[in-house]
Amino acid sequence: MMLCLDIGNSRTKGGVAEDGEIRARFQIDTRRTRAAEDLRACLAQALAESGQPAESITAVSACTVVAELRPTVDQACQALFAVAPFWLEAGTETGLTIHYHQPAELGADRLAAAVGACGRWPGRDCIVIDCGTAITFCAIDRERNYRGGAIAPGPELGARALHRETAALPLVEIGQAPDALGRSTAEGIRSGLYHGAVGTIREITAGLKAEAFAGSEVLVVGTGGGAERLAAGAVFDLVDPDLVLHGLILAHEQNQSPGTPGSARKRLK
Ligand SMILES: Nc1ncnc2c1ncn2[C@@H]1O[C@H](COP(=O)(O)OP(=O)(O)OP(=O)(O)O)[C@@H](O)[C@H]1O
Ligand SMILES: CC(C)(CO)[C@@H](O)C(=O)NCCC(=O)O
Ligand SMILES: [K+]
C-alpha cells in the first residue's frame, strides 16, 4: 500500500492507495510547529482509524506547500514506515512542461493536481480549480503544457480576514449556496463569501479560456474540499475530489520505473 500526503496550508490530506486506486482517506490539521513524533502518532492513529494500519504502508508519495514541514514528514515516515517519502515538487519529472517564468515557484499541490488531470483526461485541454485555503486555477493543455493560472483567496480565508480586520464582523461558517440577499450581518457575509467565490471562478475561467485556449472547448474540473459546495454555482463541468492524491500516485509511478514507455523526462522550460 502507498500513502499519499498532500500537505496544505490548513489541512493535510491523506490517502491510502493500492494498484493506483485510493482505498481510504483521512485529514489532519497542518501545524507548522508540529514535532515529528507528534506527526508520527497522528498518522498512525489516522491510518488505524481508516482501517489501514501503518504496517501495510510500503511507500509514501507526498507534496507540500509548507516547505519547513518536509524534514518533520521525513522523520515521521522514517519512524513509522521505515521509508523515505517521494516528494513531488516543481523540478520532478512528470511529463509536464511548466511555462512559469520560474518553474520552481509553482506550488507542488498545483503540480500534483495538473499531473492528476493529465492522467485522467489525456489529450484534453483542462482548467483545474482547486478550492482550498486558496482557490487556485491551472490551465493545462492537451500536450501537457502547464500554461499558468491564478491564485485567489478561498471563502474560509475571507471569513477569517473579515473577522480579524474589522471591529464588528463575526466569524461565520460559510454554509451552502446562500441567497445573495442577506438580511443580517452573518447572512450578508455568507452571501459575499459564497457568491464572491462563484463569481471569481466564473471570471477567471472565462479569462483562462480566452487567453490560454483561444475560446476552444476546455474541460473545467473542480477539486479540493470546497469544490462540491461551489459546484452548485454551475462553475465546473465535473468535480473530482481526488485529483491531487491521484497526481501523487501517478508521479510516484513515473519516477519509480524510469525506463518504461511514457515515463517522464525533466522538461522544465
Ligand atoms: N460552504 C462552502 N462553500 C464553498 N467553499 C467552502 C465551503 N466551506 C468550506 N469551503 C472551502 O473549502 C476549503 C476546504 O477545502 P480543503 O480541505 O481542500 O482545503 P484546505 O485543506 O483547508 O486547504 P489547504 O489545502 O490549503 O490546506 C475551505 O478552506 C473553504 O475555503
Ligand atoms: C497557492 C497555494 C497556497 C495553494 O495551496 C500553493 O499552491 C502555493 O503556495 N503555491 C506557490 C505559488 C504558486 O503556485 O505560484
Ligand atoms: K490545497
Image: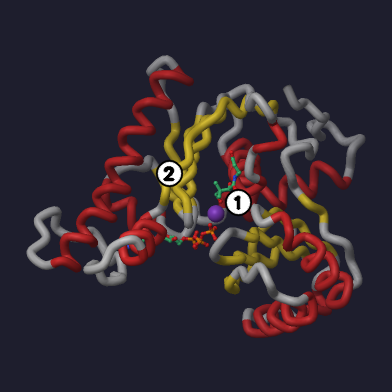
Residue type at numbered disc 1: Val
Crowding near pointer 1: few (<14 within 10 Å), some, many (20+)?
Answer: many
**Residue 217 percent across, percent down from the top left:** 41, 23
The residue drawn where x is 63% and y is 79% is 50
**Residue 92 percent across, percent down from the top left:** 79, 39
Front position in the image: 250 or 157: 157
The residue drawn where x is 84% and y is 43% is 255
Crowding near pointer 2: few (<14 within 10 Å), some, many (20+)?
Answer: some
Image quadrant in which the C terminus is located: top right
Residue farthest to the top? Answer: 214
Name the quadrant containing residue 262: top right
Q: Nearer the viewer, mark 1 or mark 2?
A: 2
Give the secondary structure at mark 1.
Answer: helix
Name the quadrant containing residue 106: top right
Residue type at numbered disc 2: Ala
Judge from the rendering whether residue 51 lies leftward or rightward of residue 266; answer left or right.
Answer: left
How many numbered discs sit on the rendered protein? 2
| Ligand 3 neighbours mark 1 (CB distance < 8 Å) | yes
The image's mark for residue 244 is 1
- Of mark 1 and mark 2, the one earlier in the sequence is 2
Q: Does residue 116 appear anywhere in the picture?
A: yes
Give the secondary structure at mark 2.
Answer: strand
Residue underneath mark 2: 152
Judge from the rendering whether residue 33 lies leftward or rightward of residue 206; answer left or right.
Answer: right
Front position in the image: 246 or 127: 127
The image's mark for residue 46 is none
Q: Does residue 18 appear anywhere in the picture?
A: no
**Residue 219 percent across, percent down from the top left:** 44, 33
Q: Quadrant of ligand 1?
A: bottom left
Image quadrant in which the N terminus is located: bottom right
The residue drawn where x is 75% and y is 77% is 35
**Residue 115 percent across, percent down from the top left:** 65, 40
